[in-house]
Image (cartoon, rainbow, N blue to C red):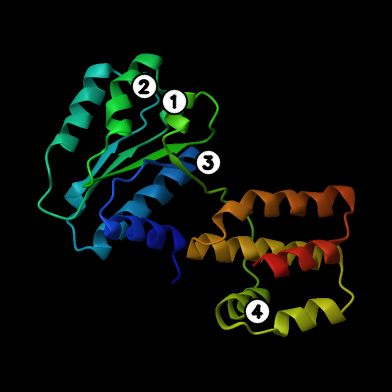
């Protein structure tokens, strides 16, 4: 299974350089945290590192206590007997200015063995000084959409094998707008399952809404996305 995010992080690890924190954005807080935790565990598995080297500061919907944050960050001062360790801080938009200030050095001068994962449903409320120091990854997962095995297979073959069956199907047939929407939704499912095209998910969702609500030409939208992917 392709995993562009994992590969990108692995490239940075293998170079041996310091890595700026990764900020993961998503609409659903619980789903986002679960996805990022799974990503962290998969990364540890890639390097045969025990899961105990994933340190998580969980979102309990309470105000951050500075002493708790300082205790959490202390783990970063100990070099692990492995290539790296991961620090996951959930829902950083709930942090107070005092909590942010306690993390500045942690963000500014991360050791090469420390990988920092952050989650938030929005950049709003996050200090600019923090945003300027992170690598932002959008994970706009779309829920309640169903996989169409026929369309999904064509998408998979088009992306992975350069099979052009999908081009013939959509360019030569006159289709209803529901079929165009169905294809876009299955592109989202494919992207979610394979963690690719991540930065496109919000735009694809906007195009789905345009077809549904504004009667935008579905064929034009499909043409655009088949060229992009």
Distance (Cα) linking label 2 and label 4: 46 Å
Residue with the mark numbered 3:
28
Q: Position of residue 96 (x, y in %)?
A: 40, 17
Asked if residue 149 can be seen in this view, the reply is: yes
108 vs 165, left or right, is left
Q: Nearer the viewer, mark 3 or mark 4?
A: 4
Compared with 94, 158 (above or below) is below
Q: Earlier in the sequence, mark 4 or mark 1?
A: 1
Distance (Cα) linking label 3 and label 4: 29 Å
Residue with the mark numbered 1:
129
Q: Nearer the viewer, mark 3 or mark 2?
A: 2
Q: Earlier in the sequence, mark 3 or mark 4?
A: 3
Residue with the mark numbered 4:
154
Q: Nearer the viewer, mark 1 or mark 3?
A: 1
Q: Earlier in the sequence, mark 1 or mark 3?
A: 3
Q: Earlier in the sequence, mark 1 or mark 2?
A: 2
Q: Position of residue 190 (x, y in %)?
A: 57, 66
Q: Residue at x 36, y 28 (%)?
A: 60
The secondary structure type at the circle numbered 1 is helix
Q: Are marks 3 and 2 in contact (CB under 8 Å)?
A: no
The secondary structure type at the circle numbered 4 is helix
């Amino acid at each position: 299974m392709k995993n562009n995010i994992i590969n990108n992080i692995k490239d940075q690890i293998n170079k041996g350089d310091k890595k700026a924190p990764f900020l993961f954005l998503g609409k659903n807080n619980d789903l986002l945290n679960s996805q990022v935790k799974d990503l962290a565990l998969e990364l540890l598995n890639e390097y045969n590192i025990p899961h105990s080297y994933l340190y998580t500061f969980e979102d309990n919907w309470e105000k951050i206590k500075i002493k708790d944050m300082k205790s959490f960050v202390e783990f970063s001062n100990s070099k692990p007997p492995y290539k790296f360790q991961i620090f996951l801080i959930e829902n950083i938009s709930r942090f107070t200015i005092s909590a942010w200030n306690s993390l500045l050095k942690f963000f500014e001068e991360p050791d090469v063995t420390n990988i920092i994962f952050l989650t938030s449903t929005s950049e709003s409320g996050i200090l600019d000084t923090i945003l300027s120091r992170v690598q932002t990854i959008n994970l706009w997962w779309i829920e309640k959409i169903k996989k169409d095995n026929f369309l999904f297979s064509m998408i998979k073959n088009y992306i992975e094998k350069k099979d052009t069956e999908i081009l013939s199907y959509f360019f030569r047939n006159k289709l209803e707008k529901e079929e165009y929407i169905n294809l876009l939704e299955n592109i989202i499912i494919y992207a979610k399952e394979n963690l690719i095209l991540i930065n496109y998910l919000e735009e694809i969702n906007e195009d789905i809404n345009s077809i549904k609500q504004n009667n935008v030409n579905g064929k034009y939208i499909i043409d655009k996305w088949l060229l992009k992917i």
